[in-house]
Amino acid sequence: QKFWKALKKANNNRWFSGKSRKYNIKTFIVVYQRKYPLEKVPTFKTVYNYIHSGEFFIKPIDLPVMVTLKPRKNKKSKPKGTNKKKLGRSISERPETVLNRQSMGHWEGDLVEGKKGKNEPVILTLVERLSRRGISRKLKNAKSDTAQQALIEITTETPEAFKSLTFDNGSEFAQAASLEDEPKLNLKIYFCHAYSAWERGSNENFNKLLREFIPKGISLHHFTDEEVIEATKSINLRVREVNDYQSAEEIYQKMKN
């Protein structure tokens, strides 16, 4: 059958494993079904049963993440609690259109550590909420001056792409509110409530994917700027269920044009 040949070819191309993987089994099946709607295609449960049998050309060990068959529990999307520190405008003031992912240009930001330490490099990550497309930039340290300079460079390079940015209340973003005063920009800055990482859920999920390339506890001195950019590119090209079986890059480019 054509499907099994396509699945085998995808596996041989390492589209299910490794750092450049493009699909998991479920996303591959859905994309294939959409491409060939008249063809009878097995369910992903059937394919997983073959994989788990140990007698299939794909082995369980070949797949870094096995898709859960349990329904996903929806977390509350309404912010609650209070801000521990007031660095600027609260996320509570963010419009519904941002919360509901109805328009492009609204980003979430964070810093990702490698090895903990005062003068250790970090990675600034920004994720666009509608498309889940990420931007990453290696920084020499986590100081607010360093983070602010990088934010100015990124946002002023394509100012039309940024309508709002949402950060946590970490001291590294202590200067972020002043981005609203940049003459080239027209954006709003928001800050999450204390201990509410889920309020930046898109960014948190992106950071988890980045950990496949940048593991915890390893100094970022070992990673070049180019490696960080390539890792981000690979994540952006990955077909994801949350994006209706498209990649973040596909959605971003469609919505941008």
Image (spheres, grey):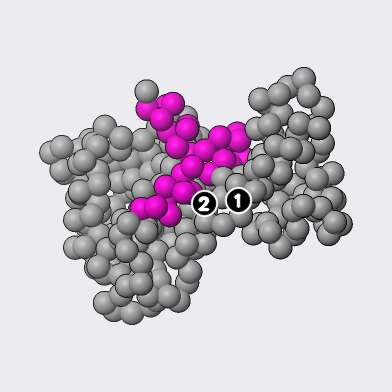
Q: Which mark is residue 98?
A: none
Q: Quadrant of the C terminus?
A: top left
In front: 122, or 39? 39
Circles 2 and 1 in contact, beta carbons < 8 Å: yes
Taking 82 as reference, is 154 above or below it?
Answer: above
Taking 173 as reference, is 157 above or below it?
Answer: above
The reply, left or right, for residue 140 in relation to residue 197 is: left
First in residue order: circle 2 vs circle 1: 1
Q: Position of residue 37 (x, y in %)?
A: 73, 22
Taking 71 as reference, is 86 above or below it?
Answer: below
Q: Is residue 95 magenta?
A: no
Span highlighted in magenta in the image = 229-256
Looking at the rendered structure, the secondary structure element under dot 2 is: loop
Frontmost of labels 2 and 1 is 1
Looking at the rendered structure, the secondary structure element under dot 1 is: loop
Instruction: Give the prevailing secondary structure in the magenta stretch.
Output: helix
In front: 197, or 52? 52
Distance from Cα at disc 2 to Cα at disc 1: 8 Å
Taking 108 as reference, is 245 above or below it?
Answer: above
Q: Quadrant of the N terminus?
A: top right
Q: Residues within 10 Å of mark 1 (few under 14, many from 20)?
A: some
Q: Residue under circle 1? A: 14
Circle 2: residue type:
Ser
Q: Residue under circle 2? A: 20
Q: Residue at x 82, y 27 (%)?
A: 40
Q: Residue at x 13, y 38 (%)?
A: 183
The total of numbered circles placed on residues is 2
Q: Position of residue 105 (x, y in %)?
A: 36, 35
The reply, left or right, for residue 171 in relation to residue 72 is: left
In front: 116, or 80? 116
Q: Residue at x 21, y 62 (%)?
A: 146
